[in-house]
Amino acid sequence: MKSGKQNGGACIELRDISKTFPGGHQALKKVSLTVRRGQTVLVIGPSGSGKSTLLRCICGLEEVDSGSIRLDGRELTGQPGLRDRMRPELGMVFQAFNLFPHLSVLENLTLAPIRVRGRKKAEAESLARELLLKVGLADKAGARPAQRSGGQQQRVALARALAMNPKVMLFDEPTSALDPEMIGEVLAVMRDLADEGSTMLVVTHEIGFAREAGDELIFMDEGEIVEQGRAPDFFERPRTERARLFLDKILY
């Protein structure tokens, strides 16, 4: 849990968003939530509950069928031009690392800031080196991604997202593709970001991280938010039978 930082106004606001895929599967059913500046919101739930679709709709990889998505008070739904301009404000870290294999670690971090943000090369490289130091990879700037472990590659991906100085960080189960011994190094960086007051919306299956790192926890099932509140309350006193059944399976 973050200490000493007050949460601010609304950063992301979702109101009644719904999404149905071809074939009739409704992945999201009138989902509403607010992520405030400086807040870390954790999203958990069984496979197929709509967690990843939620993030993909926020960052524009999927279009919602109905509802409203606002970023810093600006309506993004139905405005593709504005959404494209606002996309750099959303830092996305996926399950897969999605690094450019032909570029060095440093080049992976500086490409978008130079081309999209218009930063000078020297400025972009200076920030990139600061971020590599932050994620514990200061000595790997010249390496190719394939020369690094999975945990290191995910930390590079995290630093690459931070290099755009986004308003909010979105994480889609960032440790799910990692070997168990590599998970801790990625979660440690995410804990530091939470402690520093970064605005984060995190889909995760790491229950220990969800217990301790979030300001708020959301439990989803079958495309809906079933419970929402403080993480300790959810784990100690779940309000719904569906949540109790979920916890029984993952905790015992």
Image (cartoon, rainbow, N blue to C red):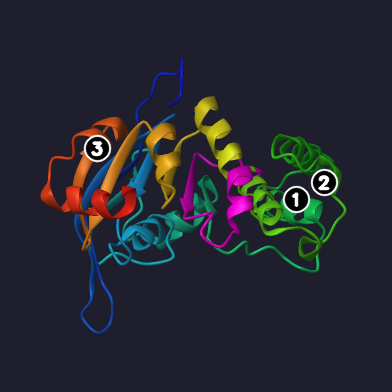
Q: Is residue 169 visible?
A: yes
Tell whether 84 sits left or right of 141: left
Magenta region, residue range: 163-186
Between circles 2 and 1, the one closer to the viewer is 1
**Which quadrant would the N terminus be assigned to in this image?**
top left
Q: Is residue 217 magenta?
A: no
Q: Nearer the viewer, residue 242 or 36?
A: 242
Q: Label 1: few (<14), some or many (≥20) within 10 Å?
A: many
Q: Which residue is mark 1?
A: 110
Residue underneath mark 3: 234
Mark 2 touches mark 1? (CB < 8 Å): yes
Tags 2 and 3 touching, CB below 8 Å? no
Of mark 3 and mark 1, the one earlier in the sequence is 1
**What's the residue type where badge 2 is placed?**
Lys
The magenta stretch spans residue 185: yes
Residue 71 can be seen, yes or no:
no
Foreground of the two, 118 or 186: 186
Tell me where residue 51 appears, x and y as whole percent: 34, 58
Task: Tell me which residue sits at (63%, 64%) in the image.
Answer: 98
At label 1, the amino acid type is Thr
In-image side of 109 versus 49 (left or right): right
Q: Amino acid at mark 3?
A: Phe
